[in-house]
Amino acid sequence: MTVFNFFRFISPLAWIPFAILWFQIGDKPAIFIIIMASFFPLIISVIAAVRNIPESFFRVAKEYQFSKRDMFMKLILPAINRELITSLRICFGISWVVIIAAEMVGSQDGLGYAIWDARNGLKLDVAVCYIITIGVLGILLDNIFQYCLTKTRGNVYAK
C-alpha cells in the first residue's frame, strides 16, 4: 500500500515532461497522464471497498463452492458496485481536470490545446468559450455517473 500512496501523492502534472520524452507529442502523453492521475485513487478505493465486504459473505460463497469467476461476478462486484461507481466518478473528475492541462503542453489537439492556442493568439473570447465547453461537458458526463449511481441504490444483496 505504501507504493500506491507514494505514487498517489505525486502530481500527475509532474509526469508531463517524462510523458513527452517517452511518448513524444500527441495523444499518448495525455493518456499516460490520465492513467497516472486516476489509477492510484481508483485502486485504493477498490481495495478499501473489498475490505469492507463482510467476512460472512465470503464464508457463504466458500460453502457454495463459488469459482473465482463466481466470487468476483456474484459477490465482490455487486458488493462494491456503488463504491466503484462513486470512485469512477471521482477519478473522472480528476482525469477531466488533468487532461486539459496535459493537452496544453503535450498535445496538438483537444480542448486544452485549443485554450493554449487561443491564449497565444490573444483570442481570450475564444478561450472563454472553450472553458465554458469544458465545464458543460464535465457536468453532462458527471450527470451520467450520478444517474448510474442512483440506479444502484438499495440493497445490492437482495437479488
Image: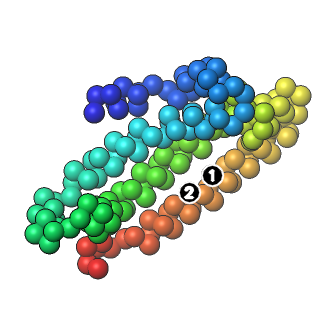
Amino acid bearing label 1: Gly
User: Dot 1: what SS?
Assistant: helix
User: Dot 2: what SS?
Assistant: helix
Q: Few, some or many C-alpha atoms within 10 Å of disc 1 (few <14, some 14-19, many ≥20)?
A: some
Quadrant of the image occupied by residue 136: bottom right
Q: Is residue 28 above or below residue 92?
A: above
Q: Which mark is residue 19?
A: none
Q: Quadrant of the C terminus?
A: bottom left
What count of labels does the image hold? 2
Rounded to the nearest whole Å, what is the CA distance between mark 1 and mark 2? 6 Å
The residue at 30%/63% (across/down) is 69
- List the residue tagged with mark 2: 142
The colouring scheme, among rainbow, by chain, secondary structure or one colour, is: rainbow
Quadrant of the image occupied by residue 151: bottom left
Q: Quadrant of the N terminus?
A: top left
Q: x%, y% of residue 21?
A: 64, 20
Amino acid bearing label 2: Asp
The residue at 43%/58% (across/down) is 85
Callout 1 touching callout 2 (CB < 8 Å): yes
